[in-house]
Amino acid sequence: MRPLFMRLPAQIAAALLLNATAWSAQAAEFTVLIYESSVELAKRASSTDGPAYWVGYNQFAGALAQAGVLRGGSALNETKTTITRGHGGSTRAVPGARLGGYFVIDVPGIEAAKQWAQKAPAGAVAVEVVAHRPNPTMTAPQ
């Protein structure tokens, strides 16, 4: 299935990149990747803008936790470039955005994951929803 791009609600003013395949409709776990501009990422360390920046993410994480769907996540250190590796060793940059963090959620399907992704904080440039694919050969540590 080709990626589906959707506009987030106007108040968020960002794009939702849905990276789904036929098997993802049945998957229960998804990773919500949050891409942000350098300007937004710089707010993290600002004594004036930092508190307001983090409030949005704390509210988003709190809503996920209260709904019982949050499995994990983290803010990521800003890097100079964000590279996504493609098929055959090719790479592509995500224009105007850097991967700022992620949330792992456990929801009934891709539609529920898209609904949660649309609630990402307003500073997000783009949000990508990726379904987890179980590895049948991997076992959990005992």
Image (tube, grey):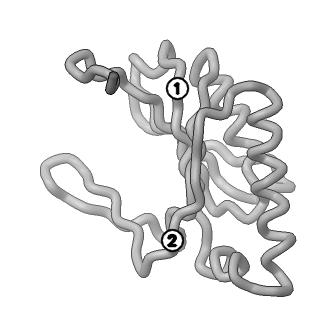
**x, y percentage for residue 95?**
47, 70
Give the quarter of the image for residue 138: top left
**x, y percentage for residue 60?**
78, 47
Locate the N terminus by quadrant.
top left
Q: Residue at x 83, y 53 (%)?
A: 10
Q: Label 2 to label 1, Cα distance in Å?
A: 24 Å
**x, y percentage for residue 37?**
61, 73
Describe residue 59's horizontal placement relative to residue 6 as left or right.
right
Dot 1 corresponds to which residue? 29
Question: In the picture shown, does residue 2 fall above or below 135?
Answer: below
Q: How many marks?
A: 2
Give the quarter of the image for residue 126: bottom right
Dot 2 corresponds to which residue? 77
Residue type, label 1? Glu
Residue 97: give its label: none
User: Which one is nearer the viewer's eye here, 139 or 37?
Assistant: 139
Give the quarter of the image for residue 75: bottom right
User: Which one is nearer the viewer's eye here, 56 or 18?
Assistant: 56
**x, y percentage for residue 78?**
51, 74
Q: Secondary structure at mark 2?
A: loop
Describe residue 93's horizontal placement relative to residue 138 as left or right.
right
Question: In the picture shown, does residue 125 fall above or below 118?
Answer: below
Q: Residues within 10 Å of mark 1 (few under 14, many from 20)?
A: many
Residue type, label 2? Asn
